[in-house]
Amino acid sequence: MERLQQSCRLTHELLRPPQACFSDASGAPHQPDIAQLRMAESFHATALSWIQELEVLVIDLRQAGGLPLCEPQKTKGIYPSSGILIEELSPDTAAKAQERQLQEQLISNSCLVVALYAADSVLLTPWTTHQLGIASRDLLQALAPSGLLAVAENMLQGVAGQQQPTHEQFLVSALPHLLSHFKLCFNHDVYQYEKAQVPKESGPDAFTRCLAARQLAFLVRQLGYQQLGTILPAALPCVLATVKDQSPAVQCYGLHALRHISEEVLSADLKPHQQQLMTVAAESLVGCDDAVWTVAAPTACAILCSMGSSCQGPGHQEVMRELLRQAEKQCHKKVRRLAWLEAIKPVFAVLGLQTLRFFSKLMPLLLNWCQEPDLATQLKALEVLQEIVRHTWPRMPAHASFLWSQMHVIQEQLQTNTACDNSDLDGNHHTALQNEMQMQLGSVAKMLYLCGGSDFQCAIRDACCDTGSVKADVMLHAIAGLV
């Protein structure tokens, strides 16, 4: 009993890294500076020993048969109409109940410790190290075979019940029990999405919400489509609450979790939540800073793609319009436009000919970026343009001549080396980008020739008759084999 109580105290200490060391003035996580390095190293060493001690305790308890399953408690008699039953317990029964409560608290806190310190390549975690990440993964592997917090019939089905549960199964069974922790951190927004009465508590500080958002994002990102479909109705309100949080750092964690859900969960499971997802996707794009935008834009595009061929409703169109509005407003920022161009490419395969609805705003934006002074933007814009041509090819005869003339402008700009705003690139990288640009121009030229219609093809064939022009023109040289 005493060992359990001490371990519970350790988990409480682990769940609160020193804020002065790992956060800035706004409460957002950041790497410790030189003055805080010694404090961080001391904390890392202490946390590593505590996590290893927790792992040993969990293994000892499992081997001793003392790990509880979260099974319904059997009580004598019938509950009164008030729903409260007072029952006298013997001292031995009370001691066993207290021990069971401590064990469940230990396992719940241990799950949160794993979610806070285990490594994740996407989630920002300045309070962990490589050794702490490995120790946390070992603790998760020690927790999983016990079947803790799992209802027996959910984990023991058929042949699979003869085997030890995996850590994914364990997390599926544990996450519903941990949602109360996240609801306390994001109480206002969670209750809003659950359509319940909003409590009046002010809530925890930004750093505490960042820790909770990181834990929730890690737990969600560990699960695949089968497990996420099971827990989605319970977990989605908490995820949406993190996306709507006031802190940009919390929003980033929530958007990473939401993107994983959009990419993994089947569209049939997402359909009941379609309107909520579309609303949150559009709102997350408005007024966010650069750090949030690099996550918000891919997440909004992933939500659009997750709906498949059904993305023709007003919610989908509003998300696409908002993506274009924000791209127009922030097109002067390189970080934002590169993130937008990288995220938008898969959307056109889903929209298909519906892309034509957005040509009036989309094409001027892309053609302007194709003539931007930096080669990276030009290359990404040409890749997006090629995707648009590929997925709207039945309507390309009406646009092929104009697009061909614009590609010629880009080619002349590249050949005269007017795209000179690449001071951050060394010579080899600049040359490699130029070569990629020429290859991409050739690919777009081939696509336009194949989709441009008979009149356009006749004009291109006439241009190819001049051998000197073909050698000097990258685009004509690329389609010479097709003529």
Image (cartoon, helix red, strand yellow):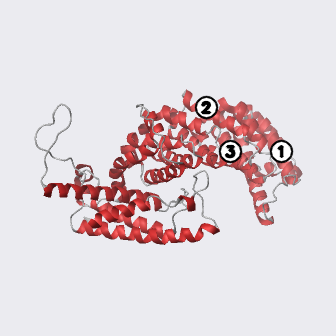
Residue drawn where x is 82% and y is 50% of the image: 373
**How busy is the neighbourhood of tag 1: few (under 14 within 10 Å), some, or many (20 plus)?**
some
Q: CA distance from mark 1 to mark 3?
A: 17 Å
Residue drawn where x is 47% and y is 45% of the image: 261
Residue that label 1 marks: 408
Residue furthest top in the image: 314
* Circle 1: residue type: His
Q: Position of residue 84 (x, y in %)?
A: 20, 37
* Circle 2: residue type: Gln
Residue that label 2 marks: 354
Image-based side of 393 in relation to 310, left or right: right
* Circle 3: residue type: Val
Image-based side of 336 in relation to 468, left or right: left
Residue drawn where x is 42% and y is 72% of the image: 49
The numbered disc on residue 384 is: 3
Tell me the element at label 3.
helix
Q: Position of residue 163 (x, y in %)?
A: 26, 61
Q: CA distance from mark 3 to mark 2?
A: 16 Å
Tell me the element at label 1.
helix
